[in-house]
Amino acid sequence: MQLLATEGINLPPSIVQRGIESYVLHMDVGNVRIETPLHEKRIAAVFRGNGPRVSEPVGASGSFDSYLLGLAVSSGASVVRKLVSEISWDRGRPQLTCSDGCGAAYDLLVVAAGVNSQALQLFDEAAPQYRSPATLKTFICEFKLTQELIDKHIGPSMHVFLLDIPRLEFAALIPKGQFLTLCILGHDVDNELINAFLSAPEVTACFPGAAVPSPVCHCFPRVNVEAAMRPYADRIVWIGDSGVARLYKDGIGSAYRVAKAAAKTVVHHGISAEDFRQHFWPACRRIDNDNSVAKVIFAVSGLIQKMRFLRRGVLRMTASEQQRRAARRHMSMALWDLFTGSAPYTEVLSRSFHPEFPLMLCWNLIAGNLARRRDNVAEEPSHD
């Protein structure tokens, strides 16, 4: 929201479904609420389109994408709502042919089709040097509850789950108006993984009566997990998920940065492949390099998911930090940025090299597991 505000784009209250003021980290060893480390790191929950299937169509009044599209129209853009069926070349310019047979050639083609569209397959012949990104299947669904129940059980928090469930990478519950959005990332997401997650006591405890309701809608979209090969050509540039995106997080933010780099290239330099290589690709490469660091961080996160003694240390350290000033909440800030995408992964990793971070982590690993051992001893029945 802060980045958009610098462009003069201020999202109205109708677009922001809920302001996220904290997140709650759930593990089998306990949970902890983490307040936003810094005031500017707050999160806005939005619906990208019209919202869940059972909701009333909200149009531009409640859809993030429609609102931005309306701003583009007010700046002079023309919206043509047709399905593109073919991409070819007409005297050196990309030509789009629609399903009704109509077509036109353009000076510049900017592809913002995402990775769930069949449109990317249209470039096999028109731009053979382009290779679409590697993807991972996810699961997203919406639960409908009353506003009162969401306020009571979820509150203004994003609920993140670090559970030792095979193939689970990340899961979160995000409140949006009268709905709860569930997002599950993992390897080979299927019904078995979804059911295992939804039946976990840490998950059911978040719902009224510890009963997970049936979702009102769901889907299995794919997300970008590896950058496209050469997302630029003469008079063509790919942005958003169809090009380069941050791993697992902040797809809107990375699309903004890449789109801005493309716009600057077009305005100040040109629209040839060489112009994009020199002035657009560096912005993509920075995100791609940062994603390499992200894979290391998520590997560590995976170890925490699998090792209970690590989870106890992380929980104890995070909980104790809530009484400290923001500058000393090392684990809390790392987790906040990891789960929300508020900072580059390189920055998250660099913070872990602060001298106090490993010292406090080691201390809490020892103290947290010793406390657990003492509790187990105290619970053993006496044989006197």
Image (cartoon, rainbow, N blue to C red):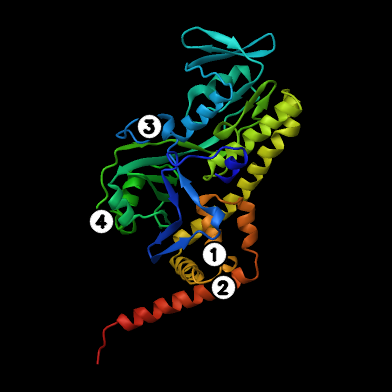
Q: Earlier in the sequence, mark 3 or mark 2?
A: 3
Q: Residue at x 51, y 36 (%)?
A: 135
Q: Which mark is residue 331?
A: 1
> Which residue has dot 4 on it?
210
Residue ID at (30%, 80%): 379
Q: Comparing marks 3 and 1, which lies closer to the viewer?
A: 3
Residue type pointed to by label 3: Val
User: Which residue is nearer to you in this view: 190 or 234?
Assistant: 234
Which of pointers 3 and 4 lies earlier in the amino acid sequence?
A: 3
Q: Badge 2 is on which residue?
A: 360
x and y percent of residue 234 in the render?
A: 70, 21
Q: Which mark is residue 58?
A: 3
Q: Callout 1: few (<14), some (14-19), or many (20+) C-alpha neighbours within 10 Å? A: many
Residue 359 in view in this figure: yes
Structural distance between the alpha carbons of marks 4 and 1: 30 Å
State if disc 2 and disc 1 touch (CB < 8 Å): yes
Image coords of residue 298 (percent x, y): 54, 53
- Left or right, 9 with respect to 183, comes to right
Quadrant holding the N terminus: top right
Dot placed on the residue nearer the N-terminal end, 1 or 2: 1
Q: Answer with mark 2 or mark 4, whichever residue precedes in sequence.
A: 4
